Amino acid sequence: MDVVVGQLFAGLSQGSILILIALGLALTFGQMGVINMAHGEFIMAGAYTAYVMQGILGDAGISLLIAIPMGFLIGGVMGVILEAVLIRHMYGRPLDTLLVTWGVSLILQQLARDIFGAPNVDVGSPSWLQGSVEVGGVALASARLFILALAIACVAALSAIIRFTSLGRRVRAVVQNRELAETVGISTRRTDRLTFFIGSGLAGVAGVALTLLGSTGPTLGTNYIVDAFLVVVVGGIGQIRGALIAAFVLGLLQSVFQYSTTASMAKVLLLIAIVIFLQVRPQGIFSVRTRSLA
Amino acid sequence: MAKTSQLPQKSRLLSLGCLALVSALALTGCGGSKVGSDTAAANTSSCVKTDGDTIKIGFLNSRSGTMAISENTVYAALAMAKDEINAAGGVNGKQLEVVAEDGASEPTIFAEKAQKLISSDCVAAVFGGWTSASRKAMLPVFEGANSLLYYPVQYEGLEASKNIFYTGATTNQQIIPALDYLKEKGVKSLFLVGSDYVFPRTANKEIKAYADANGIEIKGEEYTPLGSTDFATIVNKVKGAKADAVFNTLNGDSNVAFFKEYTNAGLKAATMPVVSVSIAEEEVQGIGAANLKDQLTAWNYYQTLDTPVNKKFVSDFKAKYGADRVTSDPMEAAYTSLYLWKATAEKAKSFAVPDIQAAAGGVSFEAPEGTVTINGDNHHIAKTALIGQIQPDGLIKTIWSSDQAIEPDPFLKTYPWAAGLGG
């Protein structure tokens, strides 16, 4: 029983990490259709933000809490710069965008290597996130609970923005029909830029959270970018709800596969499951219904 | 209507495209250790220049990538040995000139750079390598060019190339003594956790054979890809298996995630100790001593060893690189390897590879770990095995040691239970 609860928690935790890293991508890739390979490097930038904050402030607890908004800001600003300088010129050319952003991702990795050095750095966890909380005889790691809470908070905040604010309405309008949105006076340029800011900022937040689980290095982002794309593709292009469900289903599946087989085998089984799923339902869990004639 | 029906088509294409992309990306991470077959054709006549005042040697360590955390320290120890030797007059009257290359944690790059050091830099010997994958990738290069590699890290055994000198421990000087220690302490069951590559897989094969012969039950065996940081499930399995001890052959950054998870899950050294064979003083700093409190390690050298040679080694190292630096087994083995090469070259009065190979047997050196002697048959060195316990200050205290220096036996020929392990 302990093991079942423990595995369930491991799966939920894995799901919360997946949704954190994929949430930003669900916006930029899912809503805007931009294949941004540098998304992983925004995650890395967030992780290094946590490292730098800890270097400046010393105290692991305060620096973590400040690093979360800072990570959002830094990831977001990097995203806006990338959008304004490169991606803007390539809307509607997904293959070009893919190659260019991959190049950007390599440049950013090398930049991190030059600034922070090639060896990985260690970001200390605050004392209140070390150890675990006992729930019904099962020890749940505090750091993982924190990430779960952070993921839920991010999803809730993003859903609220999309649903209730005027920015959210504009984003939805642009996603459903860009030309029509433009004809009613929505500035698609500004909407695109803001969407990209939020999406990239969320990657930065994910990076801050990941420092609690492992070490931080220049290739941190590449370790997660594949999973992030998988979540968005399975969830269905253009849907946050889909990404949310996909992240937790994939997290739980991975935890079940890993428990019943091995870590390497679990990855194989997961990819096979995804391939089969996409054969049956190529549009992902959800798809946007649109009247667009495109 | 006809047009709207295109939408699913388009998204299917997009989805499949992404999937292809994603799998291509995943594959790039698993580049095998292919070594160009052209190495055999490499010229076997050496281009090493021995007529000047200097002699070139190569240092080949991962200065970047996942292994850099460990290999940078080996580089530092090698550089210190080089400076000491040069200050004392060099080798055979020649100053050492170092060509340093970055293996970048990639076996293929190790092979390429080794080839470069041998054929275009014309070095007399190369020092370095860490993972067994990197050594296996370099082996054909060194054999093809008939050059020399001094490899300073403990490894899984079952190898003895005449072109490699192994100055770290082989299994019968590290893993088997660790198992002997656990058996002595009454351990009846083990859980094996390792990174998914040559060393852990081979080491675990040997551990399982030992366990079979000694009535120890193996409760589980888990591997994770190098660099993996997701240990929630594995720690859960370890916890559920309730083994007496965990044998850890994880390498590099994975140890950070594993021990953070292990501690967070409420597991403790007192109830389920983890014996690690890849965590030395340097790694303890990166993982955090708090996460490793009282856990066990198996090595042949610790910074705390109380010998005059070691005290000088430690204080020289701190003077050169900073008081907060620590010394560890692979660093000591690397430092020793340069001195062993020096002693051999001076005994042979030559830098030529055949002369070094012929003179190597019986060459010994007063190393920080104690006196070490090269075994002329298998090119390993005799070492004393030490079990250590990690202290709150991050240093490791010796709590058990083998009675004497153990002769290297890379193929475990003297252990009946190891028959049939191959190699």
Image: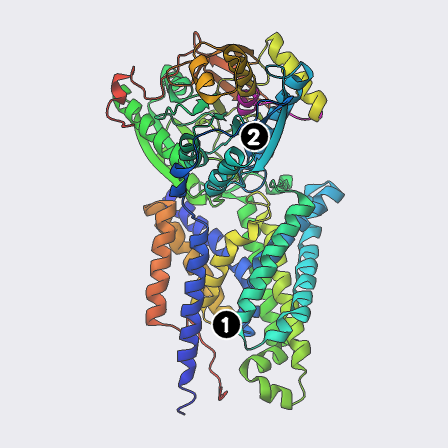
Q: Which residue is mark 2?
A: B58
Q: From this viewpoint, which residue is outermost toward the left?
A: B420
Q: How many marks?
A: 2
Residue neighbourhood size for the residue with mark 1, other residues' Cα within 10 Å, grouped as few (<14), some (14–19), many (≥20): many
Tell me if residue B353 can be seen.
yes
Relative side of A1 to A46, left or right = left
Image quadrant assignment for residue B101: top right
The one nearer the camera, A114 or A246, is A114
Q: Secondary structure at mark 2?
A: strand
- The verdict on residue B324 being magenta is yes
Q: Dots 2 and 1: beta carbons under 8 Å? A: no
Extent of the magenta region? B322-335
* Amino acid type at image mark 1: Gln
Q: From this viewpoint, which residue is outermost toward the bottom?
A: B1
Q: Pinpoint residue A83: horizontal percent, then vertical percent.
A: 65, 69
Q: Which residue is mark 1?
A: A239
- Quarter of the image that includes the N terminus of chain B: bottom left
- Quarter of the image that includes the C terminus of chain B: top left
Tell me if residue A153 can be seen.
no
Find the distance from the CA under tag 2 to the CA under tag 1.
55 Å
Above or below B312: residue A239: below
* Amino acid type at image mark 2: Gly
The one nearer the camera, B47 or B90, is B47
